[in-house]
Image: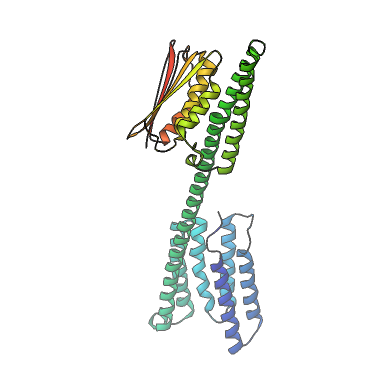
Amino acid sequence: MPRPVPWIPAVLYGAVLAGGLYYAAIGPGFDARTGGFAVLLCVLAALDGRAWRIPEGAVFALRAVLLCAVAAFDTSGLSRVLFVLVPFLGFFAFGPAAAVWLGAGCVLLLAGAFTLWVPDWAVRAEYISDLLMFALGVVLALAMAAVAVREQRARGRLEDTLAQVAQLSAARERNRLAREIHDSLGHHLTAIGIQLEKAEAFAALDPAASAQAVSHARWSANRALDEVRASVRTLGPEAESEPVGLSRTLADLVHHLDGGARRISLDVSGVERRPLLVLYRAAQEGLTNACRHSGATEIGVRVRYDDHGASLRVTDNGSGLGGAEEGFGLAGLRERVRLADGTLELSSSDRGTALTVGVPW
């Protein structure tokens, strides 16, 4: 993870360099010490301006040595402010506890330097003020480092959370599209297969019935293509893809599946308030399973509307599930019903299967 606020050392280096050069210009003038002072500050800036493949501890030690060298060449005394970088950068390299000890050491080092080279500094207000201001700078540097680290960690957690949300959203959209493909395209492909089998069986015996089966298969193919186009166009909430009217759509669906060896009946009662895609998908799933797997000859679809909601029940006289596990279609239907705050009941025996779905308005 990159170090937070990387611009702070560069700003301090630049400020100290400008102040030192200004002091030399108005005071003792430029000499070799001033040149060494400027060169060492540029080396420090270059050291902080790029990443190194050596251990962080070695870089930190080299920086501390260069800071001491800058202070030795400095004639203005401004370079002491750079030592606040020792606890500041130590916070990122070694942690908060080590940074506090480094800050305390820098304050004691400055007090020791005053003791060695400034007689009676303890009774001179300007040096006491310098020491206090330096200690305050150390405290502020530590506080800034702590805030920067917390902000960086919070930003990292936020980015991780956003990445997880994006992954979950993508997974949810993939699941939704998979359900749409299974429930719409899968159903129509099943219907096409059934009608083509009927057409083949009646080709010689009843050409009219065979032609009607081919027509129904063509309708299922066109309907599947329309639903795929609608899914591609919207790619939005399921409510946007709801059929125009459930009763009318179910009647159309039953009409094109009915006939041959099986009879499908539709019974609708009550007043439809709004189309409900979940019930249409439930009807598709129930009819597909009944036609494909159960061997049923009688299939009933019943829809009831009342003041509280709507319910759909698909029954057949087939052989039932036979202990088979629920497939992707039923699992997807349960998820649809759950999202609609509805209920789903499935009962099966060797005398038939009943699928009941209820949803509130």
Can you say whether 186 is above or below 152 in the image? above
Q: Residue at x 51, y 51 (%)?
A: 159
Can you say whether 25 is above or below 177 in the image? below
Residue 27 in sight in this render: no
Residue 153 in sight in this render: yes
In the figure, residue 38 lies in which quadrant? bottom right
Q: Residue at x 56, y 67 (%)?
A: 7
Q: Nearer the viewer, residue 46 or 296?
A: 296
In this picture the colour scheme is rainbow
Q: Please state if 200 lies on the left or on the right of 180 as rendered.
A: right
Residue 192: % across, % down: 61, 23
Residue 136: % across, % down: 41, 71
Residue at the farthest left position: 307
Residue 200: % across, % down: 65, 15
Which quadrant does the C terminus fall into? top left
Q: Nearer the viewer, residue 96 or 271?
A: 271
Q: How many marks?
A: 0
Q: Residue at x 64, y 22 (%)?
A: 214
Residue 305: % across, % down: 37, 31
Q: Residue at x 55, y 43 (%)?
A: 234
Residue at the farthest front position: 208
